[in-house]
Image: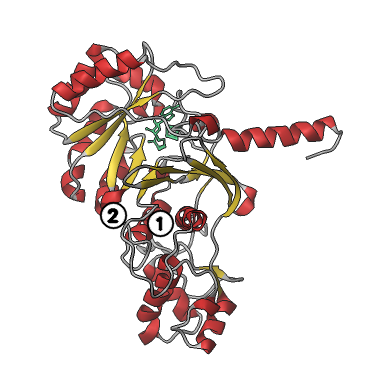
Amino acid sequence: MDANAPITQDVQTIPRTLPEGPVNIVGLTRPALRAALIAAGTPEKQAKMRVNQIWQWVYQWGVRDFSGMTNLAKTYRAQLAEHFVIEIPELVTRQISDDGTRKYLVRISGGHEVEVVYIPEEDRGTLCVSSQVGCTLTCSFCHTGTQKLVRNLTAGEIVGQIMMARDDLGEWPVPGAPKDETRLLSNIVLMGMGEPLYNFDNVRDAMKIAMDPEGISLSRRRITLSTSGIVPEIARTAEEIGCQLAISFHATTDAVRDTLVPINKRWNIETLLDALASYPKVSNSERITFEYVMLSDINDSDEDARRLIALIRGHGIPAKINLIPFNEWPGAPYQRSSNNRIRAFADIIYKAGYASPIRTPRGEDIMAACGQLKSATERARKSRAQIAADTGLRS
Ligand code: SAH
Ligand code: SF4
């Protein structure tokens, strides 16, 4: 950065002139799209209306070609096509589990790949979205944590995952048809690869588009962001996104949490709980989900269950405790707690007055369950490298 550049309060990058090459509309915030349209010749007076129209075509009807935007004049459509594109990540492979779970491998610019998981349930369908390629954190029970961070995803690549899944599910409505309220893709969880709060701005912009009535139009109650506990960003999440919050808690003492979720050394349990206490009020959400991975003989004793309750109650946090049976991956240093142990743990929590659902692992046969992501990409890459080595080629 130029050291002499003026200090500016303008934290959002709003283009005043168009950069070289076409601009991708997907992922631009309303103000950013407005500014880009004006820079490309749209009269200022019309810009707001054009943003609404274009958003509806892109996010509600799934249109990827300006020529399909039939309520815009032909000359204007041609003008848009000159300056803009509508691009989403490319689908590379799709695996479907015996239980209906779908795992997608998508390619983003630079040739990087991330995984996205769709989990159908009786009354809803949840898309598990990634926010980074890899993760900078190194939680010892998480497969993604063994992969170094490659890069943050852009807002367009995050919203693009939702659009890609709607493509695959054949879920875009047909213009003129009655509005169907029961969506195949009804919920979003930011629980794929990466730590969403270390990519705050892009995650925020993407979720704003997901929640906007002119955008993907999902209620903020149907969007859950999961974080390992990046304390300074929790208050911002409440203020600037306002979605549901899940916290990867996983331990009831700092000594154990330090080994499972090493970011605990930076922001320990007390600091984290203090930050969480004000979340529901500020974001106007009912309660926080505490995620707790069940690891045999590590964090699953009756004493742990009682300590967990005391911590949550002591801070007056409205909470639900989601127990996650550990999902194994090759070389994982832990074992899943027995079903009896998990049930006993859940029972103590439930009797203390908190909901304690046990998460059913989904898509295990295709390595799509929580914390198993990354494997397919890495394995494929290794085998390609292996093939190259075997055949004497360079990859
Ligand atoms: N980085 C964010 C979101 C992605 S992980 C976070 O850590 O919250 C989504 C959830 O899966 C987190 O609660 C994470 O702790 C949990 N998880 C990771 N690896 C797991 C595994 N092997 N088995 C079960 N849950 C796991
Ligand atoms: Fe990163 Fe979340 Fe995995 Fe920890 S649990 S390594 S924060 S993806």
* Type of amino acid under label 1: Ala
Between marks 2 and 1 in the image, the one whose residue lies nearer the viewer: 1
Residue shown at 15% from the left, 46% from the top:
281
What count of labels does the image hold? 2
Ligand 2 in which quarter = top left
Q: Is residue 104 left or right of residue 223?
A: right
Q: Is residue 166 above or below residue 150?
A: below
Q: Which residue is mark 1?
A: 206
- Provide residue 312's location: percent of width, then percent of height: 18, 28
Which residue is painted at 19% across and 22% down in the image? Answer: 349
Q: Is residue 296 left or right of residue 109?
A: left
Task: From this view, report whether residue 300 is shown above or below residue 67.
Answer: above
Label 2, secondary structure: give it.
helix
Q: Position of residue 62 (x, y in %)?
A: 47, 66
Mark closest to the chain's N terminus, 2 or 1: 1
Residue 307 seen: no
3D distance between C-alphas at marks 2 and 1: 12 Å
Q: Position of residue 221 (x, y in %)?
A: 26, 50
Give the residue pinned by disc 2.
Answer: 240
Would you call the spot at circle 2 few (<14 residues within 10 Å), some (14-19), or many (20 or more)? some
The kind of secondary structure element at disc 1 is: helix
Identify which amino acid the numbered label 2 is placed on. Answer: Glu
